[in-house]
Image (tube, grey):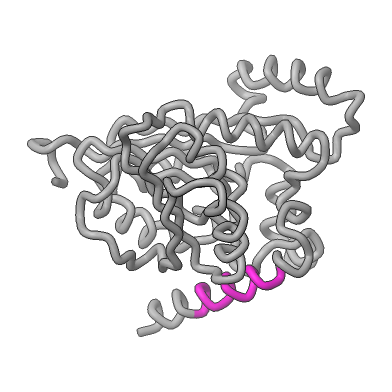
Amino acid sequence: MQKEQKINKRLENEINHGKFLVNQGAGKIWNWESPAGKRRWKRRVNLLTSHIKPSMKVLELGCGTGYFTKEIIKINNSLTAIDISPDLINIAKNTITHNSNNVIFKIENAYSMSFPDHSFDCVVGSSILHHLEIDDAFKEIFRILKPGGKIYFTEPNMMNPQIALQKNIPYIKKRLGDSPDETAFFRWPLKKRLIELGFVNIKIIPFDFLHPAIPKLLINIIIKIGNFTEKIPILREIAGSLFITAQKPQIGNKNI
């Protein structure tokens, strides 16, 4: 009962956070609108879409206002985009459905989705898992994935000093526009949890040293430095983000 109350409170907080994002400007809070922010966004688009094929049945978890949705539908003919926030998803609907009939928008609870077992070839999302009770969300994602289906997510890295401060100090968290419950991930414990929940072929890669506040004139220089730093074993661990990929086992393997 206590766990159920915790999840319900978290869902309520995220719905309220959706209203906040609409009022304050979601792109501004998410840091996608500055020159550096746009470059960071584009890199995430490439990471999340590079393995998607037109024939795949794809679920976008936490579509928000559709920043990534509009890019996924350029290469995919069967996309379902979900979010818990009616306010955010309405913006996505109004923006995108005028230009495409390849996407279905639905308000869904990530812990109890309405889709049948084995519904999707892949599940993707940007900066959404850190808003969720992660074990409950992964169990549900595992359920709706087809055997052999894959996940692709980009998430904040708790090893990054700024991220650690932002996610753990309530005043800074509120000041920067975070929701009350969101956090970030250490990649090794996250990999262990994915293994325990039945996923295979797990890769969690630190990336991104480009801060959204970097001036336009310095962006290319910082990107070059960041690309080099990402190749250095110890230093890369403090990158700002994690790229997470994993797979549900094929039929015949365990946990199916």
Q: Position of residue 121 (x, y in %)?
A: 29, 40
102 displayed left or right of 238: left
Q: Quadrant of the N terminus?
A: bottom left
254 displayed left or right of 203: left
Q: Is residue 240 above or below residue 141?
A: above
227 displayed left or right of 120: right
Residue in view at x 73 percent, y 52 percent: 27
Label total for image: 0
The residue nearer to you, when weighing 74 against 122, is 74
The residue nearer to you, when weighing 125 against 190, is 125
The residue nearer to you, when weighing 28 against 127, is 28
Is 10 included in the stretch rendered in magenta?
yes
The residue nearer to you, when weighing 134 against 68, is 68
Is 42 included in the stretch rendered in magenta?
no
Prevailing SS of the magenta stretch? helix
Q: What are the residue bounds of the magenta stretch?
A: 9-20
Q: Position of residue 233 (x, y in %)?
A: 59, 20
Q: Is residue 91 above or below residue 76?
A: below
Residue 41 image-quadrant placement: top right
Q: Is residue 39 above or below residue 124?
A: above
Q: Position of residue 74 (x, y in %)?
A: 50, 35
